[in-house]
Image (cartoon, helix red, strand yellow):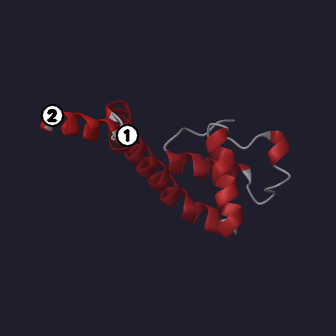
Amino acid sequence: MGNEMSVLTLCHYPDITTYTGFVYGAAQEAALSDVPEEQAVLATYDRMEPVMAGAGITGARAALLFRVLKKNHWTLAAHQRALFPDVTPEVQAELRAAVGQAPRD
C-alpha cells in the first residue's frame, strides 16, 4: 500500500522538464546576446546624444531620431528629412561619426 500512495502522489505533479529547458535557454540567450546587444545600443545613443542636443534635438525627438537612424543604417532618408529639418548634412555626418561609421554623400 505504501508504494501505491507514492505513485499516486507523483501523478499529481506534471513533468515540466521541457518548459524548464526552454526557460533556461531563453535566460541564457538573454544573458549572452540580448544584454550585450542592448548595452551596445545604449552606448551608441550615449555617443549620439551630445550631437543631437547640439542640434537642438532632445527628449522624445532625440529618441525618435535615434530609432529612425538605427532602422535605416544610420542614414536619414530623404522622406524623413522633413521631420528633422535641424539635421543638416553636417549634423548627420557628426551623428554617423559618433556611431563609428564614415560619412556618406
Tell me where residue 74 sits by quadrant. Answer: top right
Image mark for residue 89: none
Which is more N-terminal, label 1 or label 2?
Answer: 2
The CA span between labels 2 and 1 is: 33 Å
The residue tagged 2 is 3
Q: Is residue 43 above or below residue 60?
A: above
**Quick one: label 2, few (<14), some, or many (20+) residues within 10 Å?**
few
Image mark for residue 23: 1
Residue shown at 35% from the left, 36% from the top: 16
Residue 77: x %, y % from top left = 77, 40
Q: Is residue 77 left or right of residue 90?
A: right
Tell me where residue 73 sits by quadrant. Answer: top right
Residue 29: x %, y % from top left = 37, 37
Q: Is residue 13 above or below residue 64?
A: above
Residue type, label 1? Val
Residue 59: x %, y % from top left = 66, 69
Q: Is residue 88 above or below residue 19?
A: below
In this view, the residue farthest toward the top is: 18
Residue shown at 74% from the left, 54% from the top: 88
